[in-house]
Image (cartoon, rainbow, N blue to C red):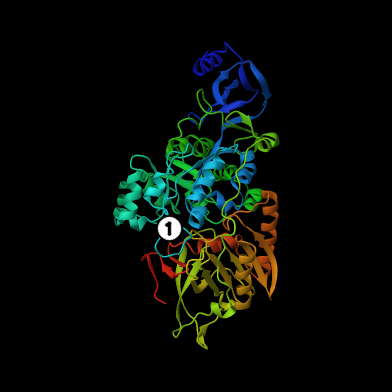
Amino acid sequence: MTELAERIAAARGDRPADLVLRGGKVFDVVTGMLIEGDVAILDGIIVGIGEEYDGEIVEDVTDLILVPGFIDTHLHIESSLVTPFEFDRCVTPRGITTAICDPHEIANVIGVDGIRYFQEASLHTLMDIRVQLSSCVPSTHMETAGAEIGAEDLKALMCHPSGIGLAEFMNYPGVIHRDPACLDKLAVFDGGHIDGHCPQLSGRDLNAYIAAGISTEHEATTEDEALEKLQKGMRVLIREGSVSKDLDALAPVLSDVTSPYMCLCTDDRNPLDIAEYGHLDYMIGMLIAKGCSPLAAYRAATLSAAEAFGLKDRGQIAPGKRADIVAIGSLSACDAQAVWCAGRRADDAAFAARGTVPPVGLHSVKAPQVRPEDFRARANRTETDVIGILEDKIITEHLHEDIPVEDGDKRPDPERDLARIAVIERHGRNGNIATGFVRGFGMKSGAIASTVCHDHHNIACVGVDYADMALAANRLSEIDGGFVVVRDGEILAELALPIAGLMSLSPFEEVRDRLEALREAARTLGVTLEEPFLQLAFLALPVIPALKITDRGMIDVTKFEIIPG
């Protein structure tokens, strides 16, 4: 018989299935009902539910509820700080069976080779990694990245089986003002899926952005913003990452009525937060705890996500769908007991049997050696632009403070929570160093530095002591990128990220432990932020309002221009 005929035969019970899950109940994300009966699987495809079946293998899932595998609709796996293979091993057991990623972090460092690395990795992981093509490398003209990717480069990457479409189009001013380079990229994907990124955009500008063919968006941070985007035809992705936490604000929008048009994403969570809280499983449980119906929460994490991104083969436990299944103890707890990816049990044996891909982007940190005096804020006027951190948000305030000029320098002032922030170009292109001020770290001594610095991934450093800042920044060159905490001339903690200065070669458990040590070391400096390193990284992203910094200076994102020095 043909493959199709075999599938039909197994669905009718005329031949045994490969795998039968017996004793549980299927949660239907269309009707919200619980369906009793077996789930039969053949060649990784569900062929039957709600009936009795014979199978070559029968697994007992008595007293468990079977839900579709969860789909993370927007993330950058690089920001998990581990390889795609370790990310797979970290989150798949929690029920995440599809991850729609944008590898623009690594692409901003090493270009198309970074995208190809993820495409190749997707062929080996247990979860299904879908690789969107990065639209904005660099994200704007106001930063120095390690590479540039144009429309022709994207065309050459389009035919890979992991592809969905064009990843988040962050340069929203370029779209609404018809920048030719932006229009060229949009034209390549015309009629296909284009992912959005337009924080606080509203009115006619939002209409113009959506009219360009952009259909999904994860930057809504308020109920009103989410409702306007839904009303104008966008699918809204609720985000809850390590820094960007919008679930509380958007939970009231998610209902049985809106859930077909809403999805869930992390954008992004590191292994420490995943270990302490969870991933999409955490989001589902929190939404239900906040009053959302189980139907709305699970539908957003599964069927709605699949349909929003054109993945018609998954999102529901139903005949003909990919056998991505999570067995949980209860809907409210979302506590994964077992996970199947395309009918394959996600266990240690399955992870050990995967293929792998050699790391890329090694020895990518080519920053100049810096001196303490490089961090002086040379000025002759006291009025100063200050980045104001909003914890759990990547948007910032544009503050103005009077800071006295002493010997031609504006000094950090820990008593006023005014720390020096600097971005150092590290791709070997120009050696730029830009400095500014930030409020919100609570830092009383020392410095922290990182090569995870969105999206250009230069060195970002914040501190109140210039010598400690120089030591921290220079140490990143020695370890090929990562995170460093320094106080009084001593390195207190560090994590090396040698893959493009973004990802570790170590298992996620080791990365988790080192992140814990880094967090504790940062607290000894007086840092009050729960996640200071990723918060620091987003202070350099010039497509998120209101005030940011790149290697070219302080950026007024509202005006989309560099503030004159």
Going by the image, does 90 lie left or right of 75?
A: right
Residue at point 64%, 37% (across, down): 354
Q: Which of 92 and 444 lies nearest the eye of the viewer?
A: 92
Residue 125 rendering spot, x and y as whole percentages:
59, 39
Residue 514 lies in what quarter of the image? bottom right
Q: Please determine whether, in this image, residue 73 is positioned above or below residue 513.
A: above
Q: Could you tell me the amino acid type at mark 1?
A: Ser
Q: Please determine whether, in this image, residue 562 is positioned above or below residue 225.
A: below
Evaluate whether residue 560 shows in this view. yes
Residue 193 rendering spot, x and y as whole percentages:
39, 41
Label 1 Cα crowd, 10 Å radius (few <14 / some 14-19 / many 20+): many
Q: Please determine whether, in this image, residue 298 is positioned above or below residue 422.
A: above
Residue 502 lies in what quarter of the image? bottom right
Residue closest to the far top: 14
Going by the image, does 476 lie left or right of 76?
A: right
Going by the image, does 297 lie left or right of 158?
A: right
SS type, badge 1: loop
Q: Which of 43 and 207 lies nearest the eye of the viewer?
A: 43
Residue 263 rendering spot, x and y as whole percentages:
47, 42
Residue 6 rendering spot, x and y as whole percentages:
54, 15
* Residue carrying label 1: 139
Residue at point 37%, 40% (across, down): 192
Evaluate whether residue 216 shows in this view. no
Q: Which of 506 and 443 lies nearest the eye of the viewer?
A: 506
Q: Quadrant of the C terminus?
A: bottom left
The tally of labels here is 1
